[in-house]
Amino acid sequence: MKIYLFILYTLISFFCVEGHAEEKPEAVDTAQVFLTANEAYVNSDFMAAVSSYENIISSGIINGDIFYNLGNSYLKTGETGKAILNYRKAELFIPRDEDLQANLKYAYGLVLDNIECKELVSFLGDFCFWYSKLNVYELISFFLALNFLFWSLVAIRLFYKGEILKIILYLNIFMLFVIGPSAGLKIYRHYFVKKGIVTSKEILVRSGRTINGTVLFKLHDGTEFEWVEENGGWVKVRLCDGKKGWVQRKVVGCIIL
Amino acid sequence: MINNIFRNITILKGLVISAVLIGTLLPASLSAQETALSAMVDKNDITLDDYVLLRLSVKGTRDEPQLPEVSEFRIQPRGSSSQVRIVNGQMSSTVEYNYLLYPKKTGSFTIGPFYLKGRGRRIESNTIRISVQKAAAADTASKDVFVVAEVDNDRPYVYEQIIYTFKFCRAVKVAKASLTEAPSFDGFIKQELGKEKEYQKVINGRQFIVTEIKQALFPTKTGVLEITPSTLQCSLVVQKRRRSRSPFNDSIFDDSFFGFSETVSKILRTNPVTVRVQPLPASGKPARFKNLVGNFKLTSSLSASKVEKGESVTLTLNVLGPGNLKNNQNIEVSGLQNFKVYDDKPVFESKIIDGKSGGSLVIKKALVPLVEGKLQIPQISVSYFNPASKRYEKAVTGPYVMDVQPAKDMEKLDLVEGVRNIAAKQDVKILGKDILPIHTGLNALTNAKKNVFSAFSLLLFIVPIIIYLTAFMFKVKGGNKEEGAVLARRKNAYRVFKKNIILASEKLKDDEPSFYQLAQKALKDFMGDVFLVSGSALTEKEMHEMLISAGVSADIADEINHIMLFCDSGQFGSKGYTLKEKENILELMKKSVSLINKKLKK
């Protein structure tokens, strides 16, 4: 028993130390900048709105609504790629936001490239609604809650073996089997699979990391691709239909935060 | 033979030792070598269509040099080479990094210093001065390859179409070519004008292959507009110069097939094109002029000229011609007060008409007459400015007269009325598309990014497991106590029986019933301890059943039964038993209990 208490104490201490060690972003009157940005947007000064929203993000505030507003501002300035890039970032935090989904759909409608493909993950997203409707933090919290419930139930069952308890335990196990892999996949795609967006009107995809490389194909503003690797100012891209090539880093944006 | 083998082994050993020594000593001797970075170029004076080969030489380290921001040149890496020298036991390494610098503008520029970063210090190279001159304009005629950008009209009216042509002319073989910098058409609306063309053309007596790309431009504002230069990078196939006459110095070997040619990279840049855009003349401008500029024809048709009241007819308008029709798809038709008008979505089809960008615009209107009689659809016109005639013109069509009959009967009239009511419930028409507004709530300023792998998450994951393990340990400990007590009672049953039987033996010679009581108690306690029940309440019958169900033989069970009856009889009966009989029953009890104990232990 003493050993368990010691482990518990150590973990709690570690958590407390980490809590204090978190660095706070530089103090900026972000509320004022936010209000200025909103006003600029309403007055159709979209460039000023873009600048202010970018300032808020660079001050360390990461929030789905800010990315959404920035996406709107970019879309109004005609920069579809940057708009989609910020909408996709917003989607990591507020995936159920209807405004965001509507505007993202509108922005996708402006993209010139038509790449026919259907990824397994996007199919899962359609079928397993919780995967697309919950963000990574919500999904993990849900999983942790189910995990807590599971161990609590098996602990109770050591002393009391009721029929209702058994049914609740089986339901809990089923939910864990559904939510656990979803949370794992979400974490993997959130942290380890990079997606990129073309942020220039038209870019050339080359066979190698030089400007002399053979031009394989062209991509246009807003087209999404898999970010395979980055090397010396060049990015290796892969489209979902299998096409691959290298593009310059400055003409694309990365969705990962 | 054996000597040879030994000699080979000795040589091999020497090689291995040398390799190991070089491998171990090389990094040490390299680190001892002083680190240096130097920069050099193959030429300092170039023209805009030339390039410079920059060579950065790094000594004493394998770190790649860092390039500073150079906005005047486009830098393209060209690989690296390395050298290791051993002179008088001193080892030195040099790595050369090559880059091609393509100038973006004219002027005198200083580039560098380039630098090496890392190991706590910064090592800088020398700087380099490069002078970039304009390419000689008179060269074009004598050049093997050149590019040209031009417009067919450099003084257009605003919204008047001009054709921008980019030509890539070459009289030599070109291995590959790519447009590295596209022109900027700020102030113009651009429309593609067909695919690129390739043809042959004689220029100053030389035959050139020309690749031509055309684009239609529509200036959207007046004043001086500039189309920025295009840059094309190509690799020319040129013959290698041979220093001396060789046996293969024959024209047949000049062919690139035999490898006596090489490619030379070249940058070609067009001149900027200046366009002076004039405003449209103010005089004669129609009242509802929609900035339509070009030369258009307007045709129309009516689906029926005789209809019943409430029925609809379709008026089709078709505008055709070169010009900025794509951006002006709204044609107003006035004088239709007696009709209910339903507009269909205009259909525009891009076309190239007389080498210019234009198209055909089809507009359909459903007209439902509201009154009976001869109704007139007045003449329909579209005003545009014709740059060829330099005046405003009008394309006209119509008019039409429509004979509107009354509805045939009341029933039909009712039906028409009903249909009209249904028709009023039309689908919601999308008049425009826009995005939804921004989120203005201040909760947007809360930081939503969290660390999924935080200690808190770990705690939430681990704590319930610890709770379970604690509960499990608690349960196991409690269970052991209970189980231990049960086992101890069983284990001690025979020992307690033997103690009790000694007590009974002491009363063997007494005539009192205490012998029988003690003997019976010893047996009952034993049975109670073995079967984990209260022994004092057991009857002969229960004992018999318990023994049989525990797998004890029926003889022993009967003997136990007999002993119990003997004790009962001794206690409560009038018949007294002799000492011998008591001793016999005591022996029988010991023997039977011993057998039961052995049996149950198994």
Image (spheres, coloured by chain):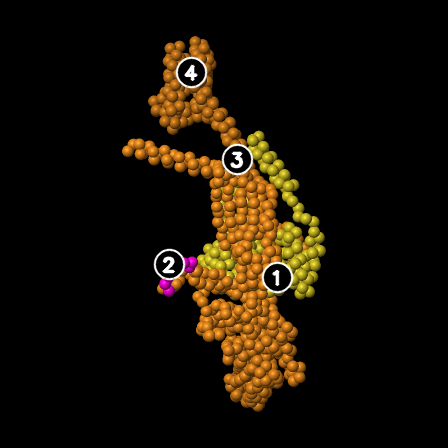
Identity of the residue drawn at 61% across and 70% down? B226
Q: Are marks 3 and 2 on the same chain?
A: yes
The x and y percentages for residue A199 are 56, 60
Which residue is the site of mark 1?
A: B107
- What is the spatial separation of the Cα atoms under label 4 and label 1, in whole angstroms? 136 Å
Indicate the amino acid at tag 3.
Leu
The x and y percentages for residue B13 are 38, 34
In magenta, the rendered stretch is: B242-251
Question: Which circle's residue, 3 or 4, is located before the other in the chain?
Answer: 3
Judge from the rendering whether residue B222 lies leftward or rightward of residue B520; answer left or right. Answer: right
Kindly state the secondary structure of the residue where label 4 is placed.
helix
What number is the disc on residue B469? 3
Q: Quadrant of residue B5?
A: top left
Question: Which circle's residue, 3 or 1, is located before the other in the chain?
Answer: 1
Which residue is the site of mark 4?
A: B570
Indicate the amino acid at tag 1.
Gly
- What is the spatial separation of the Cα atoms under label 3 and label 4, in whole angstroms? 58 Å
**Foreground disc of the pair 2, 4:** 2
Task: Mark yes or no: residue B311 visible.
Answer: no
- Front residue of B110/B19: it is B110
Looking at the image, residue A62 lies above or below residue B506: below
